[in-house]
Amino acid sequence: MKNYLNHETTIWSWLSTKDHKRIGVMFLVSVTLFLLVGGVFALILRLEHLTPDSTIVSANMYNQLFTLHGVVMVWLFLIPAIPTGFGNFFLPIMLGAKDVAFPRLNLATLYIFWVGAIVMIYGILDRAADTGWTFYPPYSSVTYTKAGPVLLGVFILGWSTIITGVNFITTIHTLRAKGMRFMDMPLFAWALYGVSVIQILGTPVLGIVLLMVVMDHNFDWGLFDPARGGDPLIYQHIFWFYSHPAVYIMILPPMGVVSEIVSTMAHKNPLSYKAIAYSTFGIAFAGFLTWGHHMFTSGMSEFNAGIFGILSMTVAVFSAIKVFTWTGTLYKGSVWLRTPLLYIFAFLFLFIFGGMTGVAVAATSLDIHWHDTYFVVAHFHFIMVGASLTAFLAALYYWWPKITGRMYFEGWGVAGAVLVFLGFVGTFFPQFLLGNGGMPRRYYHYSEEFQALNVLSTAGSWVLGLGLLLVLVTLIWSLFTGEKAPANPWNSRSYEWMTPSPPPKENFFETPRIQRGPYDYHLPLERR
Amino acid sequence: MNDFLRRLLYLPEQASSVAGEIDTLHFFVIGITMMGATGVFVAAVWWSVRYRARTLDELATTPRVQAGLAVEGGLLAFLIVLFIVFWVVGFTQFLRIRVPPKDAMVVYVTGKQWMWKFAYPEGKQTINTLVVPAERDVHLVMTSRDVIHSFYVPAFRIKQDVLPGRYYSMWFRAVRPGTYRIFCAEYCGLMHSAMLGDVVALDPDDFQLWLEGEPLESFVDLPPGPDRGGVVTQLGPDLADYPRGIPEASPPRSMADHGREVAALKGCLACHTLDGQPHIGPTWRNLWYRETTLDDGRVVIADEAYLTRSMMDPMLELVQGYAPVMPTYQGLLDPAEVGAILELIRTLSEPLPTPARSPEPLVRPPLAPGTLDRVDPARALEFIRETSERTAP
């Protein structure tokens, strides 16, 4: 049977495709590639910390590596991973559409992404930036390393993000199948809607401020140079105005994934559909009002710090609504306990622990001790990376049969999930303690009393790396030897499972008509 | 219990007056975090196992349930109350940590790549070693000379970023004599991780002796600096051994005297008097921490922050009753000079034994406003002598 993979097989047919599924697959391959690159940087960084002094790289290279690790992971993996990969692939199918609203623009986002990535790679190969992914001036204005290409690369990637956002919002508004009201959409679509709003509103601000740094760094404009009337603090405000909401760009799509998988695997409707859908917008809105909590020690008035502290906690309230709803959905379900659900367990632990330590740092007095220490490093890795990465892997296993038409290997899937979770906790839990002990982040040297925990963290990073490698190898292996996947291996009620695996080029053989909701588990599954 | 939890969580010793209460909040918050994350995780796993289906065919339809508003609302109300408690306790502590007590001893701090410089009002200067008396409030007035640094003493649970072009205040009280590590916590370039220092808290009597010239080594053994051998940099000679504890050759005069000279040479005294007489600008006598009414009606405290802002951007917060004639000193004063002027103003707030009053203004402006940056140094020095004679007790 012809499907989107085999109806045409030339390389040109991929490069020139306007099919959202092929674009999604190419994005998945791209971001996985960059996950590997960023992961290798991370492994080198951890290896360097086996000993308090120099281990394998120079101080200068260490500074470049943590910058590149951050830049690559944030802009080439975490931000694009789920929206551009799974979002592109599944949003139109979930809505019962043939494609996104602007298929050509959709292809353009892929090319823009790669142009941005290549500009950035050029910067990496030629005297890579050593500013940290936050590019704080005045240091970023005066560093002798090449910050310019990396900054420009991020600027270009921003366009890809913005266009994807516009495309998704238009698609959701105009291309829902006949009979599908907003409140009938799968929750993943709501998550993509929320994230698109943030992408459109936040990304231009980042673009502007990064260009200002380019002007300072490459052309010596002195925009952030206090000796010429500039103010480095302004940079921090503008940067975090985007980069804090960027955390929600990274976490809202994973939340959508979790909503889908929990409901399918528990075989039960979400405990409250509306709570999940509305809290998405609560997070998107409140997320824009919390940026100051990155700056409690950089010189803001006590009054402002207090306001930003309490506003930051509102995000945790909306997130807690989601957590309760997901967990409650499992209660008295009919649970299909498979690999994707294991990753959801990991997600829940990492997300709550990461999120609650976020509430802890929003209690202003504690942040003074923790700010810019390994505690913060552990906190944001738990919530941004732990939650996003586990949800990404959950989505990969959950939708693998639909995307590739093959089943993954259950045993290897479980082994990978256990290794990734243990590796992750092993890597980052010791870092909470390091931060408590007072080890500042971005430190090439550290005092000897920190060595034991650093060794533990490095050992954890090997387990995590091994787990991810196992996932990658076994998934690729399953492409060739995995069982053929049925259309609906999970007995899900969600719409993407109503079409064959893999889907045909036009997504459906007949125009879909919506007769029941995506979470109607009180109805028996219609047999086809 | 406190000590057990502190060790369990790997927190450093509690060496400042605020560390204990911050740690208490820390234990409380982290305890709840651990319980919350583990609790939800266990619930999710338990329900999944308890209600699992063994085969695909066993997957049953489930009744449609909707969360009761009471359950969700109750959980949320609990969380909101919990978060507000965190915030109220945290923010009260935050205010206490951030607002320096009035009678604290002042030390001026400058961060630069990659060292900390400390200047004492009495004129002593040190690098990377901040010597303070124990059991006394110490108020640091801080800035950076180049990029952003952050002054962090884990044992005190305090941290303050310093940005160039801005002045910051922080304070602490060391509860017992000892040596406590200073880290730079904001990434500042190649040797960021070697920008270390120590706070040496001395017995107050020893501190007085140290101020009077006794070497530091006679009170404490400084811990050895970290080994920085083998660091390869691309920036020329390695900064292998960071200097520590060696007081720079102390200048023969106090910071206030330095401030007096700067004020004269940069033309400040053309408009500001030191003896309490209003002139083109407000007098500096008794200005330190005085409530001052601005021309837009606001009342501000003339603290370091306000005074520094007024030097850099004089038109922004003009004192009521004075003409907007002061030029900006942005880029004309280096951090040490600003610190010296602040210290001069601070010393001028101590009451004079005999108030010297004069029927007419003591000081005539040597130059017309607007040409203040072209002060003749010779004339200015004469000016210092004149003013210091008149204000001498």
Image (tube, rainbow, N blue to C red):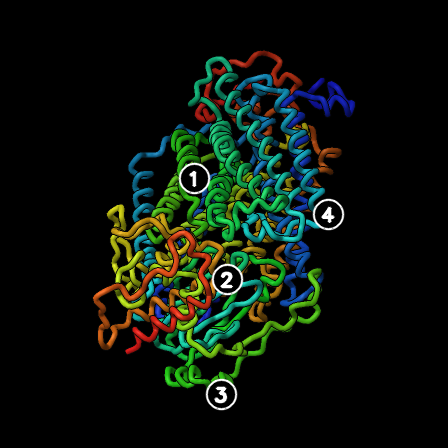
Q: Nearer the viewer, residue A12 or A422?
A: A12
Q: Chain of mark 1?
A: A
Q: Which of the pair B259/A41 is nearer the observer?
A: B259
Dot 2, crowdedness within 10 Å: few (<14), some or many (≥20)?
A: many
Q: How many marks?
A: 4
Q: Are marks 2 and 3 in contact (CB under 8 Å)?
A: no
Look at label 4 and name its amino acid: Asp
Residue type beneath disc 2: Leu
Which residue is disc 1 drawn over?
A287
Both marks 4 and 3 on one chain: no
Quadrant occupied by the N terminus of chain B = bottom left
Sequence-first disc among 4 and 2 = 4
Q: State which mark lies toward you, 2 or 3.
A: 3
Q: Residues within 10 Å of mark 1 (few under 14, many from 20)?
A: many
Q: CA distance from mark 4 to mark 2?
A: 36 Å
In this rendering, does residue B1 appear at all? no
Chain to which the residue tagged by mark 2 belongs: A
Asked if disc 1 and disc 2 are in contact, CB closer than 8 Å, the reply is no
Q: Which residue is mark 2?
A: A433
* Left or right, residue B277 beside residue A370: left
Is B223 situated above or below A64?
Answer: below
| Mark 4–mark 2 CB contact (< 8 Å) | no
> Could you tell me residue B23's position as x and y percent?
39, 64
- Residue matched to label 3: B218
Q: Earlier in the sequence, mark 4 or mark 1?
A: 4
Q: Chain of mark 4?
A: A
Residue visible at 70% across and 64% down in the picture: B236
Q: Residues within 10 Å of mark 3 (few under 14, many from 20)?
A: few
Q: Write down the chain letter for disc 3.
A: B
Q: What residue is shown with label 4?
A: A126
